[in-house]
Amino acid sequence: MKNQFDYLVVGSGIAGLTFALKAAKSGSVAIVTKKSKLETSTNYAQGGIASVVGDDDSFQLHVEDTLNAGDGLCHPEIVELVVKTGPERIRDLLELGVPFNRRHENPELFHLGREGGHSRNRILHAQDMTGQAVEKVLMAAVEEDPNIVVFENHMVLDLIIQHHSMKSGSVDLYQQDICRGAYVLDIDGDQIHTFVANAILLCTGGAGKVYLYTSNPDVATGDGLAIAYRAGAKLANLEFVQFHPTCLYHPLAKNFLISEAVRGEGARLIDKKGRAFMAKYHPLKDLAFRDIVARAIDTEMKTSGDDCVFLDISHKDSDFIKDRFPNIYQKCLSLGIDITKDPLPVVPAAHYMCGGIVTNLSGRTTIQNLYAIGECACTGLHGANRLASNSLLEAMVFAHQAANECKTHIGSWHNRMLPEVPDRSAKLSNSHEGNNEMVLIAHNWDFIRRLMWNYVGIVRTDKRLALALNHIAQIRMEIREHMPKIPVNSDLVELQGLALVAELIIRCAIQRQESRGLHFNVDHPGKDESSLRDTVVFKNPAEEFLSSVPIKTSEQASAPQSSALSFQHR
């Protein structure tokens, strides 16, 4: 079956839903999501959304905090755009009915939290379940919009790319390619469908599941990164994986994050003897940037041999703790931990991909008609390390930017015929041939995640990275050679993408021979100013290029035929 829409949105988190609501005013929208519509990283976001709304705050302060966190690699024009338009996007959410917390003494004002790296209290939140509150409100609005159709349990296999031949002396081949849609696996119906659209939006989230320990939900397998790379889009800065310092360490607490807002309200990191240790690592102590705190915890655990450290907020008023963090309080209580009395055992875990698919000011990738928004995109906002609570803000800002650009083109799109694309719509075979090899998927999935955690984790070395690259090459060869007969299923598709994303992370990490932000290499402990640039990786028909060079400025990226295979410097 061929489905045709004006817009095809892949993912149902804050980025995809925000774009869909805005784009639906100018055309029809299909949202495909590989699990249930509410199973997104957004839904699990606790802390909140950073924006300048307080009287003691300013755009300049938020800009400076973001640049400082990004450790020299943020794109200043992107930081300015996101910070200065942030309050407008907050108003969008307020108009839809998102219940941000207000001050008890003055309900006209927001209760603003503070997290690591922020010089002011500027985190708007809905208790400690901000993402869930935002997701529910946005999804309710989507379900009421007659121009939007949501396809649950549908997984994109590959993009449909219309390739243009490369003329002699022509510039970047990929800027001449056009995305026309996607082939989508209906997981429940065991069918592959063809979706055709004028604009395709990748809003697929991150890749936390490439690591053994992560705060991310099971859907975060890097799907958007893998399919964009296979299509020929440029990706950047995949070496910068943010490890959240404080995930709950408990055998029954899968992926449960302890929000940075807990430290923002005065919680201290301590060892098993009750000694606070962050003063040894940074003047901001427990509110230092995430990369610093995560490495500090990693160092403490390796030095002591302990399995975890502890986060203690028991010195605060118990009623305040229960009111400010009801979700965390109840979850911990269900596991026998009363956070009003007891320290919480915590460990770092993979949390956020700061790199991703290269985009311009409008969220457009290096392939025409293909956009990327949210965690799967590399906009230039985060640089080498994301400032806490800037992620949901970035998703809303670029969803708005992309929708505005698409709205200006919708008239011309309607006046042209979409080309015929090959239809892969088919009922998958019910044959059980190859089902006895499904163990290969489970084994390789586990192997990749352990490999990445042990060799490409918080602290890296040249030797570990080289070994990791060899191991992942063997895994990808095994997938190519020994799994063709396994029936197409979501686990196999995720494994193929996960293996590719793991290899790209390793390659980017090898290329960056310095320590900056989230990338710390023991063999290159200092910063190298000659490496003050983005690491860009992309694929062409003959070979895969990996180069540590600046990606284009936003103005250059706006021109579809302006870039070259050698890349253009700023």
Image (cartoon, rainbow, N blue to C red):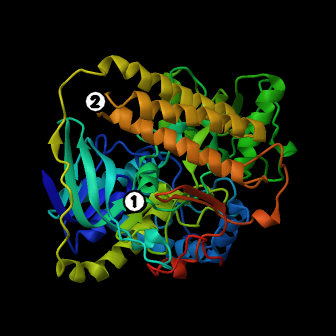
Instruction: Name the residue at 33% across, 51% down.
Output: 158
Mark seen at residue 194 = none
Q: Is residue 192 left or right of residue 405?
A: left
Question: From this viewpoint, is residue 188 visible?
Answer: yes
Tag in front: 1 or 2: 2
The disc, 1 or 2, on the residue closer to the chain's N-terminal end is 1
Kind of element beneath mark 1: helix
Instruction: Name the disc covering residue 487, or none.
Output: 2
Q: Which mark is residue 15?
A: 1
Q: Can residue 518 be seen in this view?
A: no
Where, by quadrant of the figure, is residue 28 drawn? bottom left
User: Left or right: where does residue 425 sit relative to residue 290?
Assistant: left
The residue located at (29%, 34%) in the rendering is 488
Rendering coords of residue 561 (x, y %): 46, 80
Q: Is mark 2 on a helix, strand or loop?
A: loop
Query: Type of residue at label 2?
Result: Pro
Q: In this view, does 102 lie above or below 522?
A: below
Of residue 135 and residue 473, the one placed in the foreground of this image is 473
- Image height of 561 relative to 436, above or below: below
